[in-house]
Every structure is written in structure tokens, then in C-alpha cells.
Image: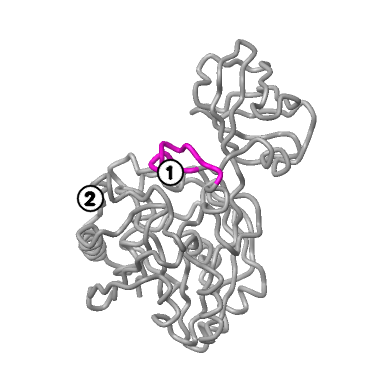
Amino acid sequence: MNPRTDDFDYVLPAERIAQRPAEPRDTSKLLRLTRQSGEVSHHIFRQLPELLRPDDLLVLNNTFVVPARFAARRPSGGKLDGLFLRERELGLWEVMFKNAGKCRPGEVVTFAGDLAEEAVLRENLAQGKWLIELAAPVAARELLERIGQAPLPPYIRGGKAEAADRPSYQTIYADRPGAVAAPTAGLHFTPAVMGALQTRGIELAHVTLHVGMGTFLPVKVDALAEHEMHAEWYEIDEPTAQRVRAAKAAGRRIVAVGTTTVRVLETAAADGGGVQARQGWTNIFIYPPAEFRVIDALLTNFHLPKSTLLMLVSAFCRPGSTDGIAMILHAYQQAIEQGYRFYSYGDAMLIE
């Protein structure tokens, strides 16, 4: 069977979409799915260290979410809702604009919140994307700290961020600026959980994948092979690559925190030579009946219908088969019935 996009659909009641994170973070629910049997059990996230094995290697994505949402005004007074995508070079940005249908190259816009900053619309990149050049070159992170807001997805309060979202929509171990969406599986960790992991002897390692705007988008083609996956910048350094290779050689489990970490590790091992240190852009698309070269367990959130993230976790439930689709949808249905909270600020799932 060649799975189709509609195979990954499910119905989620609107009240199950989390609008704010659990407080404290580690009080979120944690569903444990055992792949071999399909058995589901229910826990609290702060129990994670007890559920993992003492010799596991836990790999986390240390990307830092920049306050990428901003507002700008045209000379006519019209408001533009902007999303920073990436900095090509100092003062040259790729952005996504909403309400920019009448904009033309050469137009000068002013950033709301910092009237001293202006930018020229240099090029329409299509599909709402623009290349803009700042009038006074300044590092993206510096300016966004002044004018930006947390880039919440639209299913959280219509994307309207509050001051509390700046720290909430960020993992506690984030230190590599560049993401415009959070690696949400990591949002549940607290200093207490990290300390318990260390006490239990679980080894930690970090990779980087700067999560892009396309990560949550549903697949819009019927045949999965026709989907054009968005590319995201990643890096895995030599110390982490060595830790992964050593753990695999010793028969220890590699536990990935989030689908973004999975994409880094599987990209780093894509040539069949084991995980190697590397960096660049990855557009790897993992869906049933994919095989996995590296990871043995996955900590993740509950994902949108028809999304590439749901397809990845379905593939992991039954590598080399399409049987994982039914398994993951059955687990999701149990989560809905048990009152789990879904998506970015929602609860977590451990698949092993």
C-alpha cells in the first residue's frame, strides 16, 4: 500500500488545542506508546527520567526561537503583518508579509515599535515572501528583540502573542538563534527534569535545526512522493556525532527529542556511513514505509492532521511498513478521549 495524504487525517475537537502551556511545564501529560505491542499507558512528563533507561542517549535540538513576528507600515498607512524567515546577510532579510498584495519593489516600509528603522522592499519572492533591505544595517536578532513577538502558530490565539509567550515558546536549553517556530517536544523540560535525567545517568547531547515556517503546514498533494518538503538549516558537531556512534556501538538507545532532532540524525546518517558531523540544509521527508538508521525512541508532541510531522511519527511506529498509521491514529484517539492537549503547547508522547 502506498499511503495517501488522507490516510493521516483525524478529527480533533477544537477544545483539545492547547492555548497555553502547562504550568509548571513538566506537569503536562505524557502518553507512552510501546511499538511492539501497540500498548498505551498514561503518565506525567516529570516521570520521563523514570521511563527512560539509565544508559539512554537523549538528543535535543538547541535551536533558539527568535521573536520573528513583527508589524510594519506602508507610506499609505496600511499595516503589514510580517514574519522574519532568515537573514541572507547583514541587513538583508527574507520575510513573509500578510496584506502585501499592493506592495511593489522599491517601496519603503517602517517597522512598528521602532519608527527609526525602515526597510526597502527589494524583491517579491512569490507566495507572500519578500526580500527586504534595512536602511541602516543591523543584526536581525538585535532588531527583532526590539520590534518582534513570539511567532505563535495561528491555532494558538490566532497567532496573537502575549509577553508571557516569549519565554514560554522557548526551550530552557535553547542557545542557537535561528528558528521561527519552536521544537515543541522540548518545551516540557524543566530544570528539575534535567536534574533527574542527570541523576539517573542518562547522557545528553545536542544538535541544531532551525525550525522553519513550513514545519506545521499540512501536505496538500494526494501522493506523498509529490510533496515538496521545506528545507531547514541544521548542524551536528563532532562531539555529538561521536556520542551517537559510541552509543550505537554499545547497543544503547538513541532517544530523539522531537521530529526536528530525528531529521538531523537521519540526515547525518543518510549516506550509510553512520552519523557524521556536518551542517547544511536538509529537506528530508520521512513517511511510511521509511526505515530509520539512528533513533530507537522518540519523544514528541501531538501533531496536526495531514502534516509531515504526523507522517514521520507514523513511520517510526512501524519502520519499513505502513502499519504504523493505524497505530498512531489509535493512540491519538485514546489521547483525545483521555483529555490530552494537542499541538505546540500541548502534551507529549513517548514512542519506544
Residue at screen point 59% across, 40% down: 68
Image location (x, y in percent) of residue 315: 33, 63
Query: What residue did someone put label 1 on?
Result: 228
Q: Is residue 316 above or below residue 86?
A: below
Q: Earlier in the sequence, mark 2 or mark 1?
A: 2
Question: Quarter of the image containing the C terminus?
Answer: bottom left
Examine the residues drawn in magenta and state their main secondary structure: loop
The residue stretch that appears in magenta: 152-163
Nearest to the observer: residue 251 or residue 184: 184
Image location (x, y in percent) of residue 213: 50, 43
Was residue 225 drawn as part of the magenta stretch in this picture?
A: no
Name the residue type under label 2.
Tyr
Quarter of the view holding residue 330: bottom left
Q: Is residue 252 above or below residue 280?
A: below
Residue at screen point 73% across, 29% down: 134
Name the residue type under label 1.
Glu
Query: What residue did someone put label 2 on?
Result: 10
Extreme-right residue of the structure:
136
Q: How many marks?
A: 2
